[in-house]
Image (cartoon, helix red, strand yellow):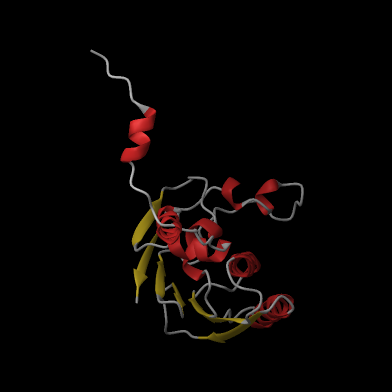
Amino acid sequence: MTRKADSANEAEAVPSVPAAAAHESASLSAPARVTSLSPIESAVATAKEGHVEFAESQRGATYNKLFGSYVAGAKHITLKDSYIRLPYQIRNLAEFLETVFTYTDRSDEVHVHLITGCDEEYADRQIDNLNQVQATFGTLGITLTYEFSDTGHDRSIVTDTGWRVTLGRGLDIYQRYSDNDWLNPLTRQQKLRRVKEFSVVYQRK
């Protein structure tokens, strides 16, 4: 037999709750307010130890994807790459600094220190190009300093937030393409470029 609820009797069966207790109960049952993360905080939260590998001629690798989460929120970054010498390698440095710009707080001054090798044949050109990059990003709140070393061959990014990113090929991960043609989308879209085979390792210091 189907039982129908007696609303009057059931109403009497429910114990009365004092107003204060009812308010407390409602407060406890209310969902906690979730504090939204800033884009930089969200990027920091995605950084994990591990490694990635890209095959020869693969597409889709960008500095933002490879390094963004690991430089996010940093104020001091050391980049070691022996081959920031030729113009296209200087461009790689500028594109790395664009990633740093995107993933760091503009209310803070960010210091990036580069350790690289000296191009003995075209040292003046290398220094001029580095100084130009230094001046450009200095106006954006990123202080670039650099030094030359002929002894270090390790390639890495080290941050004051506790990350060491070991770069198999340094920043030089892209196959050559025509970068003098501004109508070529490869000059602006890293994800469209084909890469050389490379790997990256992410470690907590």
| Nearer to the camera, 42 or 90 | 42
Question: Would you say 46 lies left or right of 93 here?
Answer: left
Location of the C terminus (image quadrant): bottom left
Q: Is residue 178 visible?
A: no
| Nearer to the camera, 62 or 17 | 17
Task: Give the answer, above or below, for where 126 lies relative to 63.
Answer: below
Spot occupied by residue 83 in the image (x, y as percentages of width and height):
52, 72
Location of the N terminus (image quadrant): top left
Spot occupied by residue 137 in the image (x, y as percentages of width and height):
69, 75
Residue drawn at the location 55% of the way across and 80% of the way down: 75
Instruction: Name the image quarter holding residue 48.
Output: bottom left
Spot occupied by residue 80 in the image (x, y as percentages of width and height):
48, 77
Residue drawn at the location 34% of the way across and 42% of the way down: 14
Task: Give the answer, above or below, for where 22 lies relative to 202.
Answer: above
Spot occupied by residue 64 in the image (x, y as percentages of width and height):
55, 59
Task: Give the answer, above or below, for where 129 lies relative to 58.
Answer: below
> Quick one: which residue is furthest to the top in this view?
1
Q: Is residue 174 visible?
A: yes
Question: Would you say 53 lies left or right of 126 here?
Answer: left
Residue drawn at the location 47% of the way across and 67% of the way down: 70
Residue drawn at the location 55% of the way across and 65% of the way down: 40
| Nearer to the camera, 158 or 167 | 158
